[in-house]
Image (spheres, helix red, strand yellow):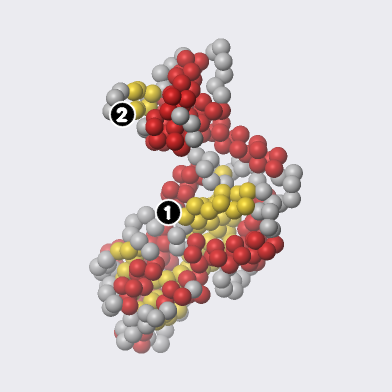
Amino acid sequence: MSHPPTLKQLKYLCAVAEHLHFGRAARACFVSQSTLSSGIQELEEHLGVVLLERNSKRVLLTDVGRDAVARSHQILNAVDDLAALCERAALPLSGRMRLGVIPTIAPYMLPRLLQQLRAEHPEFQLFIREDLSQHLVDALHQGELDLLLLAIPFPAEGVESLHLFYDDFVLAYPPHHSLGRLEQLRTRDLRGQELLLLEEGHCLRGHALAACQLSAGDLSVPYQATSLHTLVQMVANGIGITLLPRMALDTPILSGTGVRTKAFAESGVRRAIGLMWRRQAARSEEFRLFGEFIRQHGVPFSVPAAH
């Protein structure tokens, strides 16, 4: 090998692998298409292999190309971690951090958290991406995000997780619903009910069913939704009942709907909220410090200390 690959060439390769289109990959890398194409061609010449199959209609990865992309992601992540390690020489929570947050947490925690961060750490730059759990985990592995705030456990390899607190589920129901008249609400009372849930892909769906020890066969699910606000509106219109995370109740999500809520008599009807990062990340200690900051300032209700 006369010349080793450059980081720029590896970045170009990963961009093409993601978009399978030279034009879109070039725009993602903020370079011209000719610059990106030349970089990929030089990389192939230096390595002595064909990484991409090109024709007028599409771009495909060869077998060795797929392996090269996987290894390139590892190299680029390691470089990012090296830069982060050097950045740690400054005060903690004073640089920049790319945080991924799931939609059933972001609107209920971030306003309070960001306000406190600006007040106590004005030099800290927190870039936020809101998306489904699997998309965020993929972005974490690809080096696009540094840290995730999500419901755990969530299946992922090569990561560390930090439990922050528990978030109870409560029943949301329309006025005069039979479950509202129960003196003590138990999870078994949900069987056979028209329980509205978020659609597949939202981890809150699985966590809610698991917390209530229910399976899809236990329920009559007429509709699914993409947000908690939509679920609340459906409940308000008498379509069914739903489960809401406790943290959402400290926002105006129920305002003007007439929807009522009821806690479960059993303990443990809840989801766990935590942080997740790559196992070899250089900023692990800073991530733990950020987690402690969330416990103190970002939780919209009082929770016991995590164990």
From the top left corner, tell me how far across and down residue 283 is, in percent. Answer: 65, 46
Which residue occupies the foreground of this view, 306 or 200?
200
> In the image, is residue 168 above or below residue 74?
below
From the top left corner, tell me how far across and down residue 175 is, in percent. Answer: 33, 85
The three-letter amino acid code for the residue at tag 1 is Leu
Instruction: State the residue at coordinates (61%, 42%).
Output: 281
Q: Mark 1 to mark 2: distance in Å?
A: 28 Å
Location of mark 1 (residue): 132
Q: Which mark is residue 145?
A: none
The three-letter amino acid code for the residue at tag 2 is Arg
Which residue occupies the foreground of this view, 81 or 21?
21
**Among the 4 quarters of the image, the one containing residue 279:** top right
Instruction: State the residue at coordinates (66%, 53%).
Output: 124
Instruction: State the residue at coordinates (53%, 61%).
Output: 273
Judge left or right: residue 3 versus residue 172: right
- Are there few (<14), some (14-19), or many (20+) residues within 10 Å of tag 1? some
Label 2: element kind:
loop
Judge left or right: residue 179 versus residue 103: left
From the top left corner, tell me how far across and down residue 226 is, in percent. Answer: 35, 61
> In the image, is residue 252 above or below residue 292?
below
Discs 1, 2 touching: Cβ within 8 Å? no
Which of discs 1 and 2 lies nearer the camera? The answer is: 2
**Among the 4 quarters of the image, the one containing residue 307:** bottom right
**Among the 4 quarters of the image, the one containing residue 222:** bottom left
Q: Where's the N terminus, which quadrant?
A: top right
Q: Is residue 64 visible?
A: no
Instruction: State the residue at coordinates (47%, 71%).
Output: 248
Q: Which mark is residue 58?
A: 2
From the top left corner, tell me how far across and down residue 9 is, in percent. Answer: 51, 26
Q: Is residue 184 visible?
A: yes
